[in-house]
Amino acid sequence: MENIDYIDFFYDSIRESFESMFDEALTLENEASAPCCISSRGVSVIIGITGEVKGRVLLDLSLSTAMDLAVRLDPDLNNEDLVLFSIAEFCNTVSGGAITNINNKYRQKGLRLSPPSIFAGTNYKIFSPSLHAVLLSYDTRFGKIDFHIGFEGV
Amino acid sequence: MNNKKLMIVDDSPAVHIIIEKAVTANGYEVCAHAKNGDEAVKYFELTMPDVVTMDITMPIKDGLTASKEILKKFPDTKILLLSAMGDEELINEAKSIGISHFMKKPFKGADIINIINKMTIK
């Protein structure tokens, strides 16, 4: 099997999507192997990846950061449900951008995304015991945002 | 008001709000909001919009399947595919079912208006 670093495709997509949607810059603060158990900051979006390889993208951030970003996107996105959908749209845009570039470079992959699942609350954990993921932790003016990106068998 | 009707199809209410603000400010009427492809097919026949903005990845029925069903019955329908996904295979599939306008997310309101204006004057 071809040795492809799928995570490479996410760096540009995260930066471009964030800058385009929120007119703000973000800084990659930390990159590490993601833990299999995540204590959420308060809002999480999970998008599945299907096709020749399977994976998932998990975006995690605080509700306060999510609210600031949503209002930055559009001042009318100011109630909690709309905030959550806005953040899901951001995660979808990031994932779609990266997957598009993977598919255009490696045509046989045929990767597709699942609709996003959105979680919000306090003191919850997310376990992904069978997936090796990479944590990309970003600093923004509105607070930290973490992407946990994993592919099966990679 | 330019008397043109538009249907927004997307599973994200946030996208509905962003598109609706952009198009209504430019004289379009949003005649229907659909949150999946199944609703899109039903609401299309009820409201007969001039233009449809269509997401691809949605629950129940995806945007390409819904577009195919709409175009089968109404081949002159103007559909703007709006998606985070935009690889060549997907764009070719969209073209093969008769969709000629595609815009990749993220987008700005002004971008949507430019393309919808072009679609409606043809």
Image: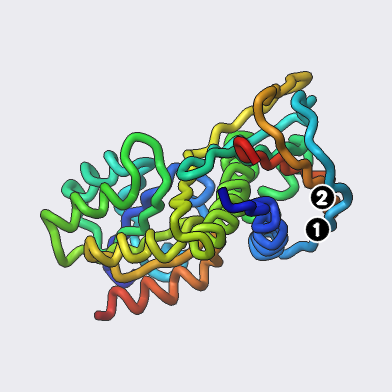
Write the residue at 59% across / 42% down: A88
Q: Residue tagged by mark 2? A: A138
- Of all chains, the one bearing label 2 is A
Does residue A137 appear left or right of residue A78 in this picture? Answer: right
Say which of A106 and B32 sits in front: A106
Residue A34 picture location, percent across and down:
78, 35
Q: Is residue B45 visible?
A: yes
To which chain does the residue with label 1 belong?
Answer: A
Residue found at x 28% / y 80%: B121
Q: Secondary structure at mark 2?
A: strand
SS type, badge 1: loop
Q: Looking at the figure, which quarter contains the C terminus of chain A?
A: top right
A101 is higher (above) or lower (below) than B100: above
Is A147 on the left-hand or right-hand side of B64?
A: right
Kind of residue at badge 1: Leu
Crowding near the residue tagged with mark 2, few <14, some 14–19, many ≥20 C-alpha atoms within 10 Å: some
